[in-house]
Image (spheres, rainbow, N blue to C red):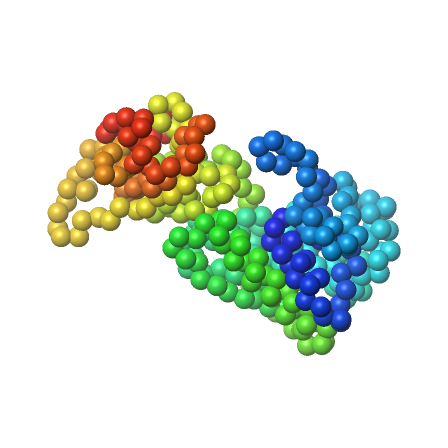
Amino acid sequence: MGTPAIAARVLDRLVTIGDSRFHVAAAVTRPDEPRGRGQKVEASEVAQVAARHGIATLKPLKIRTAEFLAEIKSYQPDLLVVVAYGRILPQEILDSPRLMPINLHASLLPRHRGAAPIEGAILAGDRETGVTIMRITQQMDAGPMILKRAIPIAADDTQGSLKAKLAELGAAAMLEALDLIARGSATETPQDDALATYTAPVKKTDAIIDWNGDAARIERMTRAYDPWPVARTTLAGEELLIYRAAVEPQNSDGDNSDVEAALRESPGTILTVAPSLVVQCGTGRLRLVEVQAPGRKRMPAADFARGRRVRERAKLGT
């Protein structure tokens, strides 16, 4: 049961690994929906992989129905393998497999439970993240853990690059967990709820930059929200997307000019245009590296500034 690319990668590995001990009886995914700029109706990534391998695919509009429950039970599943399906499963569905329902969550639980663990890890400045395989319970992402696998978060990792890494890690971890279950040697470790943190579904408004914030936090926003919804601000009344940025180092030789400049300039003020476009934040300064203006392609921020004749002391976010 899954929908996006990370779930599709797990499904593909389950099918192609060629382990005779288990068989993917069916896939459950979200209904086809409009996607991309043209809003063409397309199947989910999981549905596409399932079709390629000739796997029966269910796309229920509603999952809390007797008909869907009967359809699931008709496959007599030993396990439900859930990866980013996108819906809260009712207890009747969780009770349908002979052994258990298991879930792959893209964080090191109990940290970053909820809908946006990858974005949450980048925004928090975590040095590592990973995947957790757990038994599903009614409490969100709180079930006992079967295994965890961790990887470091690189300084330039974006939501997109980290999702790709975790898709590979998650597929390998799921195969490992299934091997443990098949051999009867899987152990379940309860989570420490006192250590739990939570993430909410990401909204487009979450990506609006507040220049009163810390420069390091805003830099992390540019990576956490790439490729969606993309960190954004405004310049002269037009939206400006910020894809890449870097925190400007502070003077370390006793020169207080940086602090004095910060006191003189309000957050969002463009301090320099050439050779780099540098913006004053509430704390620290941010150098914009790659941006996108309405109707234009992504481009170096310095090229954008020259082309638009951006002047020093212009304000972002007004």
Is the C terminus in the top left, top right, bottom left or bottom right quadrant?
top left
Q: Residue at x 14, y 45 (%)?
A: 256
Where 232 sits versus 77, above or below? above
Residue 79: image quadrant is: bottom right
Instruction: Confirm whether residue 196 shows in the render.
Output: no
Indicate left or right for 124 with 15 as reference.
Answer: left
* Nearer the observer, 119 or 304: 304
Q: Residue at x 26, y 39 (%)?
A: 276
| Location of residue 8 in the rendering, given as x and y in whole percent from the top left corner | 65, 53
* Nearer the observer, 95 or 279: 279
Residue sticking out furthest to the front: 52
| Location of residue 39 in the rendering, given as x and y in whole percent from the top left corner | 63, 32
Q: Residue at x 49, y 59 (%)?
A: 129
Q: Residue at x 34, y 38 (%)?
A: 300
Indicate left or right for 315 with 201 as reference.
Answer: left
Where 16 sits versus 42, above or below? below
Where 62 sits versus 53, above or below? above
| Location of residue 42 in the rendering, given as x and y in whole percent from the top left corner | 68, 39
